[in-house]
Amino acid sequence: MMRLFVAVCLSREMKDEISGTIRSLKKSGVRGRYVPVDNLHMTLAFIGETDDVEKVEEALSKVKWKPFFLSLSGMGNFGDIVWIGSGENKALSAAAAGVRTALEEAGIPYDRKKFVPHITLIRRASGNWRQVSENRQQALAKLPASKKQMRVNRISLMKSEEKDGRRVYTEVFSI
């Protein structure tokens, strides 16, 4: 059995920019389980435990999508999960819809929550992250476009596993 999800992996530059947000949150006393910078990604579909990786790869190989730019925008939360979002992006939404349709047509179960483009930063967050969020949004707005966006040239099937007490994500297939 493998725990799988489909994601956009972030460029080193985008991870570096987001790590600045994470540093600001930590300095401001926001506590919680921070996502390690190397694990930052945008999930398009969470599949969960499966033993048929080939079936998932076959389904994903049928997805039609075009490269696009992913940009950072404001921060938000789902309860105690804090995330940084992506601006309105029809190509990203179309790619996520294509992935989900392919999984559905192949009979592969996945989490059917509505797709909300976001990159999780903290789980079980506590503290005044909203104030930091407002300051970071102002800082993001002043950044050159190259710092707050990246070109997405592939979509990845990722394996999630625990190694030495920490979560590790590894690409197993890409389209």
Image (spheres, grey):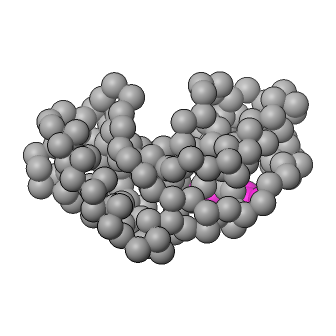
Quadrant of the snapshot with the C terminus: bottom right
Of residue 51 and residue 101, the one placed in the foreground of this image is: 101
Q: Where residue 16 appears, x then y in whole percent?
A: 37, 69
Identify the residue at image location x=19%, y=57%. Answer: 24
| Residue 171 part of the magenta segment | yes
Can residue 36 be seen at all in this image of the molecule? yes
Of residue 39 and residue 90, the one placed in the foreground of this image is: 90
Q: Name which quarter of the figure residue 38 lies in.
A: bottom left
Compared with 77, 165 (above or below) is: below
Q: In the shown orientation, is residue 103 left or right of residue 50?
A: right
Of residue 33 and residue 62, the one placed in the foreground of this image is: 62
Residue range (magenta): 170-175
Of residue 117 and residue 33, the one placed in the foreground of this image is: 117
Q: Name which quarter of the figure residue 108 lies in.
A: top right
Q: In the shown orientation, is residue 124 left or right of residue 66?
A: left
What number of labels is visible?
0
Magenta portion: prevailing SS class: strand
